[in-house]
């Protein structure tokens, strides 16, 4: 056999093996809905590949037959020049690295482009092998299912969002991506993670007189809803006061006359999803948060929950502080440092 013809035939068989293996693996790695979406938006390559994707099991069968023939040809050609163990070793290296692994890495990343360019060849191949591949493809289709269910983890969805944000062709806005991320994290968060801590809650007693002083204090607190207690000595909650109701009052009254008599409690270890469903069902927008000992540890408003969904602070006309949890944390850290400094002073 002429050396030039031999090398040409070996290279051709290796290329056929590479293309058939790469395209077969790459097409199966495509997301049907993403491919369809690109095709609908006018991507010419996606349109061609989507028509192949609808017959992917037949295509896989045709490429599988082609790949086997190409690999067999490689083994025969290598064996013609090298015999014994070295023929097996060399054939394995050529097929594994040049006919399988390397093309899979490249073609899988660029499968839409490669498959679109090879569309006439692939269509012809499917047409020639149709008597065998159509029935075999139907068999695979019955076994695997035409639309195999794809399940993604939260981490995978986050990475998909990263790719969408980096892509210039993405039609997902930054605000939409932020909300999707927050929704994915929503189920992992507890009430204690987002509630307003006790030290930042402005309590009102039912006997407080409504006037400029009280309204100023309530407005400066940064809240628009306030838990009402019977007295300041005991945290016995008796109602909820809404700042908007005070604005509408022109006559001097006490809190008890204006407050809502409803008080709702929620445990700090409950999920935010539980809190959201409770807000919707009870139509009450402020919960008193308690711990395992039924001690008052903070409050949770419906805005606190919605902020975790939209990923943005909700500031209404009565709010002054953007993040009261951070304020409370800062105060707590300062008090801790002061206690540590006092402890050092006492030791001296």
Image (tube, rainbow, N blue to C red):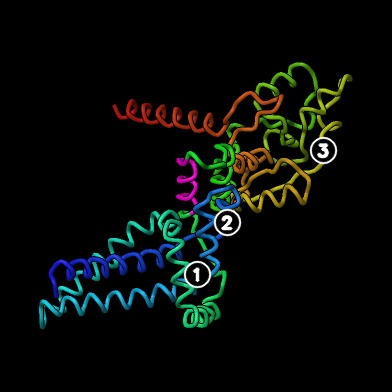
Q: Nearer the viewer, residue 249 or 103?
A: 103
Element under disc 2: helix
* Residue 44, label in figure: none
Near mark 3 (Cα within 10 A), the count class, few <14, some 14-19 or many ≥20, is some
First in sequence: mark 2 vs mark 1 = 2
Residue farthest toward the front in the current orientation of the protein: 2
Classed neighbour count for the residue bearing mark 2: other residues with Cα under 10 Å, few (<14), some (14–19), many (≥20):
some
Q: Are marks 2 and 3 in contact (CB under 8 Å)?
A: no
The circle on residue 260 is 3
Q: Which residue is mark 1?
A: 56
Task: Determine which quarter of the picture holds residue 146.
Answer: bottom right
- Cα separation, mark 2 vs mark 3, equals 54 Å
State which region is magenta. Answer: 157-167
- Name the residue: 54% across, 80% down: 138
Label 2: which residue? 36
Distance between the Cα atoms at labels 1 and 3? 64 Å
Determine the secondary structure under disc 3. loop
Specify few, some or many for label 1: CA neighbours under 10 Å numbering under 14, 14-19, or 20 or more: many
Residue 285 point in image, percent of width and height: 73, 41
Residue 331 lies in the magenta-colored region: no
Provide residue 283's location: percent of width, then percent of height. 78, 46
Q: Nearer the viewer, residue 79 or 346?
A: 79
Was residue 160 drawn as part of the magenta stretch in this picture? yes
Residue 142, percent from left and from top: 55, 80
Residue 190 seen by the camera:
no
Identified at 49% across, 53% down, the residue is 45
**In terms of secondary structure, what is the magenta stretch mainly?**
helix
Q: Which quadrant of the structure image shows residue 17?
A: bottom left
Q: How many marks?
A: 3
Classify mark 1: helix, strand or loop. helix
């Amino acid at each position: 056999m002429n050396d030039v013809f031999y090398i040409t035939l070996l290279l051709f068989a290796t290329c056929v093996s590479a293309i058939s293996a790469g395209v077969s693996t790459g097409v199966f790695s495509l997301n049907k809905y993403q491919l369809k979406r690109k095709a609908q938006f006018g991507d010419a390559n996606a349109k061609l590949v989507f028509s192949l994707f609808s017959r992917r099991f037949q295509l896989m069968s045709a490429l599988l037959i082609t790949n086997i023939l190409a690999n067999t040809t490689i083994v025969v050609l290598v064996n013609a020049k090298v015999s014994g163990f070295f023929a097996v070793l060399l054939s394995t290296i050529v097929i594994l690295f040049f006919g399988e692994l390397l093309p899979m890495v490249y073609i899988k990343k660029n499968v839409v482009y490669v498959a679109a360019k090879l569309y006439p060849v692939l269509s012809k191949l499917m047409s020639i092998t149709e008597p065998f591949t159509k029935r075999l493809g139907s068999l695979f289709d019955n076994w695997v299912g035409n639309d195999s269910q794809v399940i993604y983890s939260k981490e995978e969805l986050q990475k998909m969002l990263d790719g969408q944000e980096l892509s210039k062709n993405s039609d997902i806005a930054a605000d939409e991506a932020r909300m999707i991320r927050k929704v994915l994290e929503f189920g992992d968060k507890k009430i204690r993670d987002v509630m307003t801590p006790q030290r930042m809650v402005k309590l009102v007693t039912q006997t407080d007189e409504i006037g400029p002083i009280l309204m100023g204090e309530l407005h400066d607190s940064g809240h628009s809803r306030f838990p009402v207690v019977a007295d300041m000595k005991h945290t016995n909650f008796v109602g909820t006061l809404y700042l908007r109701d005070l604005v509408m009052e022109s006559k001097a009254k006490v809190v008890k006359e204006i407050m809502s008599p409803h008080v709702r409690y929620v445990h700090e270890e409950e999920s935010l999803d539980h809190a959201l469903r409770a807000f919707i069902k009870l139509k009450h927008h402020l919960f008193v948060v308690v711990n395992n000992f039924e001690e008052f540890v903070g409050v949770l408003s419906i805005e606190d929950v919605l902020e975790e969904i939209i990923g943005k602070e909700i500031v209404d006309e009565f709010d002054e502080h953007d993040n009261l949890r951070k304020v409370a944390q800062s105060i707590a850290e300062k008090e801790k440092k002061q206690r540590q400094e006092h402890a050092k002073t006492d030791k001296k």
